[in-house]
Image (tube, rainbow, N blue to C red):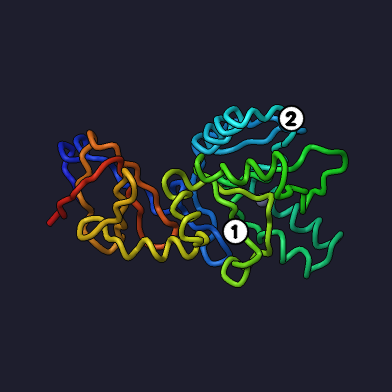
Amino acid sequence: MERSNLTSEKNLQFPSIHEGNLILVNPDYPCQSQLSRLNEVRPAQNTVLLEDQASRALMELFDRLEIVDEIVCFDGYRTHQQQIELYQNSLEENGQEYTEKFVAKPGCSEHECGLAIDLALNQDDIDPICPSFPDHGICGLFRKQAASAGFIERYKESKKEITKISGEEWHFRYVGIPHALIMLETGFCLEEYIEWIRNYPLTRHPLYYEGWTIGYVSQDMPLPKLDKNLECSISGDNVKGWIVTCAGHVKFDTVE
Ligand SMILES: [Zn+2]
């Protein structure tokens, strides 16, 4: 794709389809993002890292809910090697059936992209694979407010046929605002949401949701011009295109 320097200076650049907070990561679509920046999140028993935007959103939500140490960040970013070890250890300790239910295959874990956080109720003896994160008390409050900070409960038991992972009430995935709110409202898991949002091509009929304009751009189509002055962010879907999210009601032209 060729674009002049002048154009690229004025317009937002599309990242790789493997980058961004809306990438779909599952057994069919492995994590291929190049992490640029990780930050430490707290409280935690060991060092727990998350991608920059996700970490800031999580810490802001903890502040807002006045969480001091009732909840701990149990696990965040994992290197590919750590995911391999976790998977192998669980196979040895828990067997194949249990491991396949709860541990993503190495390469296919959202933890390797830095966008997933496992939270645990702060207590002695936290289960390393299935930490307790109940529906009531402070955990319940966090669960209710998670979407307002851009987090979704990624693996619901009711969606396990689609996600291929059993219910994990402790695993939260950062997708950003307003996507987490729309997913909460529609009940879509990320697989369903990514498919559904393709019905809203950015340049023809985007989705207008609250104060946002959201649209899909396929990698097979000409890229629209997105002026840098617009408040837009672009995320790959890790499948075949991008999701563009803009503040306000925006209309776009296609590039011929
Ligand atoms: Zn997890």
**241 lies left or right of 128:** left
Work out whether 140 lies above or below 154.
Answer: above
Q: Residue at x 32, y 49 (%)?
A: 244
Count neighbours of disc 1 (C-alpha within 10 A) and say few if under 14, some if 14 to 19, many if 20 or more: many
Q: Residue at x 51, y 61 (%)?
A: 187
**251 lies left or right of 209:** left
Q: Which residue is mark 2?
A: 69
**Under tag 2, what secondary structure?**
loop
- The residue lying furthest to the left in this view is 256
State the image coordinates of residue 109 (x, y, percent, origin top left). Answer: 61, 55
Q: Which mark is residue 192?
A: none
State the image coordinates of residue 205 (x, y, percent, origin top left). Answer: 23, 60
User: Hey, what amino acid is under mark 2?
Assistant: Asp
Work out whether 61 lies above or below 170.
Answer: above
Task: Looking at the picture, tell me which residue is in the foreground, 195 or 19.
Answer: 195
Q: Are marks 2 and 1 in contact (CB under 8 Å)?
A: no
Count neighbours of disc 2 (C-alpha within 10 A) and say few if under 14, some if 14 to 19, many if 20 or more: some
Q: Residue at x 77, y 53 (%)?
A: 130
- Where the C terminus falls, by quadrant? bottom left
- The residue lying furthest to the front in this view is 136
State the image coordinates of residue 220 (x, y, percent, origin top left). Answer: 27, 64
Among the two numbered marks 2 and 1 on one chain, the one whose residue lies closer to the N terminus: 2
Between disc 2 and disc 1, the foreground one is 2
Work out whether 186 lies above or below 212.
Answer: below
**199 lies left or right of 153:** left
Q: Which residue is mark 1?
A: 108
